[in-house]
Amino acid sequence: MKQLPCIVGPTACGKTRLGIELAKQYNGEVVSMDSMQIYRGMTIGTAAPTAEEMDGVPHHMVAVASPEDSWSVARFAEAADRCVQDILARGRLPILVGGSGLYLDAVIAGRSFAPGCSGGAVRAALAQELRRGGIRPLLEELRAVDPEAAARLHPADEKRILRALEVYRETGRTITAHNRETRTAPKRYAPVYIGLAFRDREDMKARIDRRVEGMVAAGLADEVRALLAAGVPRNATALQAIGYKELLPAVDGSCSLAEAAEEVKLRSRQYAKRQLTWLRRNPDIHWIYWEKEQDFARALQIATEILTANGIQ
């Protein structure tokens, strides 16, 4: 398995900058593992790197999708893996950078995904059955064919219940069996995880608040207006991202920009906490902790030592 550096951590912790510094040092290219940076026209709110910040380092999986689209984990993993394979074929080092843990895990695992798509006939039929009869008969159907999945899923989790039935109706196999097989399959790549985090949670919160204030000052509200003016539906996946959903009321005039910004700060801090919870389940992450300020020279030195010790030259 090819070893790949993976820069992880909660939002606003400096992953993008460290990834760029490592790419310059290792003849590498960055592959973003951010589920929202894929959408065009969303540079400010997703903290996507600007051309100046990229400093000549090629970036992949940034601004590659229409904000009207909705990308699944499967679609993201397939597209990102093509980028990784292309970089490797050119003799360069892919550096995976981002905080969307589920998406990163899918790329590393090379996981196959069960059939089904949002525009498919089976999903449309299931959605119609849900509207007509509610979730109960569908959950009973799932319990008959895949009791493990039915026991695992809450009746309110309509999305996953429909997904499990979709897989069974399309393939004749349960999603439980598919997931069990993918978990036991060997990984496609060997990750070398480097995690960034603030030692003190209060410093992390302060950093997040400053970032949000910077986004608002940079014109986040105008970015939201531009997306709406371009015809992006309010319920589009892109506009459910933190920083966009909260600013919709401000753009409508139903709350002030300052009130919306406070909500973005709150949601961002909550998201960072969830990211840390997800990441700390992984014992293979080599953590670099920031003190009050971010010392990138020190972080680069430590990261280089970690990569060298793991055979990445």
Image (tube, grey):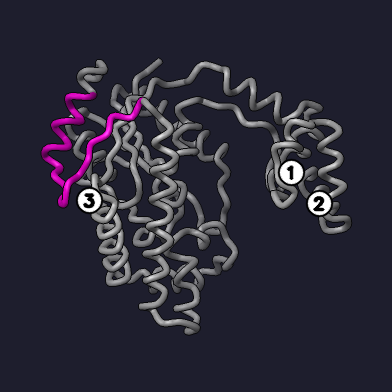
Question: Would you place residue 36 above or below residue 45 in this image?
Answer: above
Q: Choose the circle earlier in sequence order: 1 or 3.
A: 3
Tell me, yes or no, whether the two marked residues, 2 and 1, touch with CB atoms within 8 Å.
Answer: yes
Quarter-of-image position of residue 84: top left
Residue 155 shows in the view: yes
Pointer 1 residue: 161
Pointer 3 residue: 53
Question: Would you place residue 306 above or below residue 226 in this image?
Answer: above
For badge 2, the amino acid type reads Ile
Q: CA distance from mark 2 to mark 1?
A: 8 Å
For label 3, the SS is helix
Magenta segment: 284-306
Residue 135 circle label:
2
Give the label, 1 or 3, closer to the camera.
1
Q: For the point 41% across and 30% down, which residue is it?
A: 282
Q: Check residue 291 for magenta coloring.
A: yes
Q: Choose the circle earlier in sequence order: 2 or 1.
A: 2
- How far across and down, in percent of the image, does residue 221 sit? 39, 73
Q: CA distance from mark 3 to mark 2?
A: 48 Å
Q: CA distance from mark 1 to mark 3?
A: 43 Å
- How far across and down, in percent of the image, does residue 286 sit? 28, 29
